[in-house]
Amino acid sequence: MNYLKAFTKGLIKENPVLVMLLGTCPTLAVTTLAINGLGMGLATTFVLVCSNVVISLLKRVIPKEVRLPSFIVIIAGFVTFVSFMLQSYLPDLYNALGVFLSLITVNCIILGRAEMFASKNNVAASALDGLGMGLGFTFALLCIGIIREILGSGSIFGFSLGGWFEPIGFFVTPAGGFFVFGVVIAVVNIFSNYKMSSKKFGCQNCPNSAACQADSKKEAHES
Amino acid sequence: MKKLIVSPSPHLLSGNSTSNIMFDMIVALFPALLVGIYVFGPRALIVTCVCVATCMLSEFLIRKLMRRSNTISDFSAIVTGILLAFNLPPQIPLWVAVIGSVFAIVVVKQLFGGIGQNFANPAIAARIFLVVSFGTYMTSWTEPFAYRYGLDATASATPLTDLANTKTLDLLLGNTSGCIGEISALALLIGGIYLVIRRVINPLVPFTFIGTVFVFTWVLGEDPVKQILAGGLMLGAIFMATDYSTTPATLKGKIIFAFGCGVITTLIRVFGSYPEGVSFAILLMNLITPLIDRITATKPVGTGGTNRV
């Protein structure tokens, strides 16, 4: 696995939120303010890198039958750590993220990367994969957060745009979150290489194809 | 000798076209528009013109931008503009009306494929977008004929929030506060009768919608006559619950649709926190229209009734 590719693929091409549509719940829930989106993204990135490294180190130790519970325990450990750190040093962000901070544990991006990548690759590649995916997640949350904060609250990172702009309350509501989410996905689809043309549509064009097809090959080999 | 013409079906044409139907809609909306202008003054006309102009301009520009054939000549954008204006209070800031019109045409109508493809009524969805976004502007009402005494927007309750002190005759003729197009039940009924005569709408839909609200508000101990005359019920039942692309195709489906609208309207009016529920009811029923279409699909003869669409 090319190390550069392991890092960059998560940013846009296989962006976990905007292309693979994972982690939709935190994406919609915390992005009413840009700073919350950024905080959520960075917290998740930290957990993702750490859990990827540890799972990659332990990939030969963990029995295949109980791998998912083991992954969850490792992830939950790092989430607890992040949660305590934020509560101690950034209590405002901690309060703003609320229950969604603990819910990083069940964020399918993290478990997905553990299952698809970290349990099959070496430590350095797993760390880079986690970093790339985490930053892609942060990028998506930041984009959606900035758009929703400007339109819905008339401010950007908490700085008011001035009285001339009348906030449009719709963008703070969950419906507005879905709306901005959809528009950002559409824009990313225009600018990324991933296009749903009939020629390219198929298994090999899926963003998960590398891992997925390697899996099925291995299973076919084993059986 | 006469030439023999070979053509594919359909062979019987009704002569109806989208532009004919939309033109009938505009004619039918005229009485209510005149009452609105008479009661609320030139401001009502300005809001309507701004909505219509913005709708047409956004329809033209978005079709150009998407490199699609232009559908501006079918008048549907004009109807959307008038219907949206009818759902706004007369003193609404004009930029709010512009945002609503752009949202109706660009987001609700054209992003889903344009006329015939939209899943929700553009005017209804835009109204709800504005209610959620600009609650203060959307609930600042004007007393009728305030413009004659030089008064500005005086915040008065709508008939629905103060039904006991509103006269039935005022609700019928439009001598009341409210949105531009919803005040006079009589003018809306005249438009509705015109549409029925022109066979643009099926009278059973507004009849079921209004009848359901009548019965259920009566059962729940409200004044049913005032309930069906006040608020946006006539406007919604006659002009919006009969929209072709966002309501079920079969008659059975249309009746289910109208009944659902009536029930939701009553529930919101009587138990909900918003005074008026017509637009929410129509939007919610718009969303389940594909499901209603599915369960009421006509079965082809000879398939034994087990045919699934």
Image: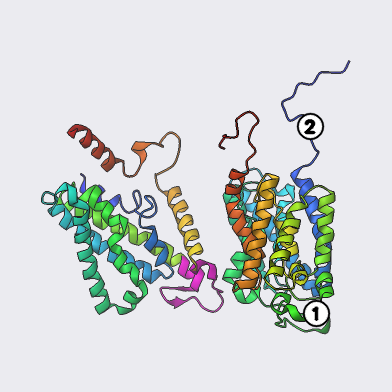
Question: What amino acid type is highlighted by mark number 1?
Answer: Tyr
Q: Which residue does the numbered mark 2 point to in the structure image?
A: B12
Chain under numbered label 1: B
Asked if residue B249 shows in the view, the reply is yes
Query: Who comes first in sequence, dot 2 or dot 1?
Result: 2
- In depth, the one of B305 and B172 nearer the eye is B305
Q: Residue at x 80, y 68 (%)?
A: B184
Residue B147: image tag: 1
Q: Residue at x 72, y 83 (%)?
A: B154
Q: Classify 10 Å Cα crowding around label 1: few (below 14), some (14-19), many (20 and above).
A: some
Q: Position of residue A218 (x, y in %)?
A: 20, 36
Chain under numbered label 2: B
Q: Position of residue A10 (x, y in %)?
A: 31, 52
Q: Residue farthest to the right?
A: B1
Q: Which residues are magenta?
A: A148-172
- In depth, the one of B143 and A89 nearer the eye is B143
Q: Residue farthest to the top?
A: B1
Decide if residue B178 is on the left or right side of residue A214: right
Tag nearer the camera, 2 or 1 = 2
Q: Classify 10 Å Cα crowding around label 2: few (below 14), some (14-19), many (20 and above).
A: few
Cα separation, mark 2 vs mark 1, equals: 52 Å
SS class of the residue under badge 1?
A: helix
